[in-house]
Image: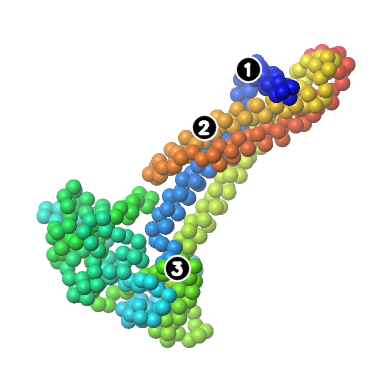
Amino acid sequence: MRILTLYREYFSMAWDALRSHKMRSFLTTLGILIGVTTIITIWTTIEGLNQYVYGQLSNIGSSSIYVEKFPWVITGDFWKYRNRKEVNWKEYQAVLKQVTLASHVAPEVFSIKKVEFKKIQLEGVFIIGSSEAYTFTSSVYPVEGRFITEQDVSNNRFVTVLGSELAKRLFDKENAVGKRIKIDNDVYLVIGVLEKKGNFFGQSMDDYAVVPIGTFRRVYGMHRGLRISVMTDYPEQIEDLKDEVRGVMRKERKLHPSAEDDFSINQQDMLSDLYKKLTSTLFAIVFIIGGISLLVGGIGIMNIMLVSVTERTREIGIRKAIGATRSNILTQFLLEAVAISSMGGLIGIIFGYLAGLAVLAQMDITTGVSLTSIMIGFGFSAFVGITAGFYPAYKASKLSPIESLRYDQ
């Protein structure tokens, strides 16, 4: 109880000292406030971005790989990839028949076309030609109607499944299933609407249509390059799956054992690794800037505490004369430094969190305040207060009571 009483007294004295020099206290805390605001802004932005990006990347699926001409992340000579052969139908058939670890294999071809319904005409709509396996390899499922079936694919039927955004743009609140739309110059029956996937940095992930790949190839040509999506039900087998797919593709392309792959096997990890590389350096630089602000703030606290010790030398002498120990004096001035720093830290946390939300709002990303960010803000400010305040507090505790009482400003 005695310790709690002493600490209450120390904090009360610290608060009185701050109130008696309001402007000086404000200017002293400004460096801490700016530093903590910077760090919390970045931390809040990082947390929001991470939740958003990894949530969107999960739509790709950690259990799927994609065989195609270009890698998702291109390093080095672009023309090396540009001159590769396209992935073709024969190779898709080989992967479908020979890869034993695959649960689902889907071919994918893409084009940009005009879509019409009555008087509504939409330009630049993304059209995907695929098979019934696409719903599994891409983790998209119908919320209305059904997905394309094996019979739709084998019979080259003119049917289509719409993304939720495309369905809304064409039909508003009407039921899309059973309606007929035109894709380019051909009429398709809408058989389903897919669940909403949301936006990715402002771009809709639901403004597309899926048609049977046989129909697509018959209408737009048989020689387009493919992407092959391969999925396993067992994520721990993903590396073995890649090795098996690579073996089939190399055999089909008759590559010499010493030759490098002339195709790419892409997966979700490539994008998440790229995201980490792109953001880690940027965030480190901004954290360094915030750290410099905290350092400047700490120097300010040390300077003002040294002035405070000089101004209150007689007070220190009186306290020592009536029984205050060196540890009492040390604790008093140390807590005063922590109080100054914590005040700047608290305001910095509030400003930083609001600034972080403002940054994320510009990207249509929402997030909540985390205990981690609060602890980081208080931790930084308290650390700076203790570090910067220790020397002045130690100097105050070492003062001789007789010399302090003789001190005259």
Which label sits in the foreground, 1 or 3? Answer: 3
Quadrant location of the C terminus in the rendered image:
top right
- Comes first in the chain, label 2 or label 1: 1
- Count of numbered circles in the view: 3
Disc 2/disc 1 C-alpha distance (Å): 21 Å
Locate the N terminus by quadrant: top right
> Which residue is the extreme one toward the front?
1
Coordinates of residue 358 in the picture (x, y in percent): 43, 38
Q: Nearer the viewer, residue 312 or 368?
A: 368
The amino acid pointed to by label 3 is Tyr
- Name the foreground residue: 144 vs 396: 144
Q: Residues within 10 Å of mark 2 (few under 14, many from 20)?
A: some
- Against 340, residue 241 (above or below) is below
Residue ID at (87%, 21%): 400
N-terminal of the pair, mark 3 or mark 2, is: 3
Q: Amino acid at mark 1?
A: Arg
Q: Which mark is residue 19?
A: 1
SS category of the residue bearing label 1: helix
The numbered mark at residue 372 is: none
Q: Residue furthest left?
A: 118
Q: Is residue 268 left or right of residue 133?
A: right
Is any part of residue 70 visible from this angle? no
Please tell me whether mark 3 sits on a helix, a strand or a loop.
loop
In which quadrant of the rendered view does residue 222 lie?
A: bottom left
Front tag of 3 and 2: 3
What is the three-letter code of the residue carrying label 2? Ile
Label 3 sits on residue: 234
The residue at the point 62 percent across, 30 percent down is: 342
Q: Circle 2 sits on which residue?
A: 350
